[in-house]
Amino acid sequence: MNNFQSLGLSDKIVATVTSLGFEKPTPVQKEAIPVLLSGNTDLVCLSQTGTGKTAAFGLPLIELVDDQNRITQALILAPTRELCMQIKSDLTNYCKGVKPLNIVPVYGGASIQDQIKQIRKGAQIIVATPGRLMDLMDRKAIDIGEVNFVVLDEADEMLNMGFKDDIDFILGHTPKEKNVWLFSATMPQEIQRISKKYMTDPYEISVGGKNQGNANITHLYMMVDDRNRYEALKRVVDINPDVFGVIFCRTKAETQDIAEKLMKDGYNADALHGDLSQAQRDKVMKAFKAKTLQLLIATDVAARGIDVSNLTHVFHMNLPDEVEYYTHRSGRTARAGNTGFSIAIITRRDMHKIRQIEKKANVQFVQTLVPTGVEVCEKRVLELVHRLHDVKINEKDIANFLPAVFAELEDLSKEEIITRFASLEFNRYFDYYSGSADLNKKAEPRDRDRDGGKDRDSGRERGEGRGTGGSRADDGDYERMFMSIGKMEGLDNGKLLGFILQRCNVPKRAVGRITVKGAYSFFEAETEFADTIKNMLHGFDYKGRRIRVEIETDKPKRDAKKTSQGKREGRY
């Protein structure tokens, strides 16, 4: 089965697929399409993103859906509006010259009235996010009671996003007799539950193995201090002039912050997150697909549905808690047989996540060093020389300008011209990187099984003077923070600690002594995380009140005496 004709597709679809540039079916298409064309089977397909899953279910759907019947015959559920739009676009392309199907995408952030109008024209295939579909069902504007096919695309991601109950509700309103096609990158227990509850003896396809990453991706990590994450990112981008990638952040605020810093520093970058309007999201994605944007900074949720070819890099400003999220992130690169890099910028405390991902996703990380300023300068100059060698010369049009150029340079020797030419690129980076520090974390990650429970940096037993939530008055490695919310907002020590940890994504040990007053609070933050905490909290609305956060410049002297339980007073 080395061509689409051999899969059992009609001549019209084969001709359309060929005209779109598809030459050979991918492994998942080879296995899925012949099975699905029978029109009478359930399917569970485990395959990574970027392996051609949309065509794997889309081409059989186009063959099986009756264009003469205006009722909704197929329902495709996807986790995000971006993925909905991508699926609709792909299916529309597959239909050209085959049959006139009305494919309607329904998702939040767009006019629900316009979507209702499209549905009433007779939507044979509906591509939907669970939330908007349920809204339309409540309004009696959509009928899925006669669908023959239900496709769950990126099912694991829908479950990760909390759509479990929504999926149960939607599937509960579909006919008992139907075909369910489930596509997922990973196989968590909830996927198995859906399979058992809604499917009958499903045909199973696994391309690459359960929870397994793409073999064409090189997984790297760089170890730095938390405050140096952004600078490390910049150096990697600078030393890779042709980088075209996605930078993943955990929160919308961090996503916007990184994007604004990159744009301010002169990079072609922009953000994609849930606080943007649909028009803004569309504009950003259009620019990224056209490659007028070099870097897209995104949250996990917003990045679902990004289908852009030839991404060279995926960056992780923070590693996700769930291995499945890492698999989805890294799967943005190395698509369609290409190679790519997945680079995690971590601190020493993140090593356990690296090991967890290696074990569960069956990938191997390699530690790499953050480039030095000298290395960046050297690479940029050599890149300029390579471009000089490869430049296309338009001899006819430039001929009239060359005499003036030669005249301008006649007092310079060949060596002087080369030196000055190279300096145009060199100076731009040397001025910035001159005297720059080495960002690499020198200490190796702590091996608790071999160091006898001691911190290699100091020989101190774990927990001594550095307990989670405790005071660091004795070692001075803290900042005292002011925050303009307190008991008036219903906070106590525990609630404030939980809010800081959740909002800022810092380890529990980063927060020390907490004092909650009526309208304000004080707390200690480890110096390494102080700026991060301030940036993530300052200006955030908490119960209708805009938070103000300040780092106090003068640390007060404190009584470090312990209570009878051995804990410092004031510790949560």
Image (cartoon, rainbow, N blue to C red):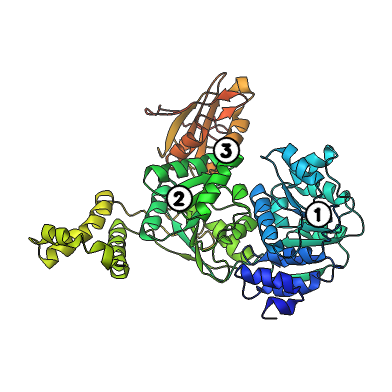
Q: Residue at x 61, y 23 (%)?
A: 544
Q: Which mark is residue 42?
A: none
Callout 2 amino acid: Arg
Q: Which mark is residue 503?
A: 3
Q: Residue at x 67, y 68 (%)?
A: 16
| Closer to us: 194 or 509 | 194
Q: Taking 558 as reference, is 541 left or right?
A: right
Quarter of the image where one finds residue 110: top right
Callout 3 amino acid: Arg
- Secondary structure category for the residue under label 1: loop
Residue 280: x %, y % from top left = 55, 41
Callout 1 amino acid: Gln
The quadrant in which the C terminus is found is top right
Residue 463 versus residue 500 in the image, above or below: below
Graded by Cα atoms within 10 Å as few (under 14), some (14 to 19) or many (20 or more), the crowding at tag 2 reads few
- Secondary structure category for the residue under label 2: loop
The quadrant in which the N terminus is found is bottom right
Q: Taking 220 as reference, is 4 left or right?
A: right
Q: CA–CA distance between discs 1 and 2?
A: 67 Å
In the rendered image, is residue 441 in sight?
A: no
Residue that badge 1 annotates:
124
Q: For marks 1 and 2, give the one nearer the viewer.
A: 1
- Secondary structure category for the residue under label 3: helix
Residue 464: x %, y % from top left = 49, 45
Q: Earlier in the sequence, mark 1 or mark 2?
A: 1
Q: Residue at x 57, y 66 (%)?
A: 335
Q: Earlier in the sequence, mark 2 or mark 3?
A: 2
In the rendered image, is residue 288 in sight?
A: yes
| Closer to us: 164 or 17 | 17
Q: Which mark is residue 460?
A: 2
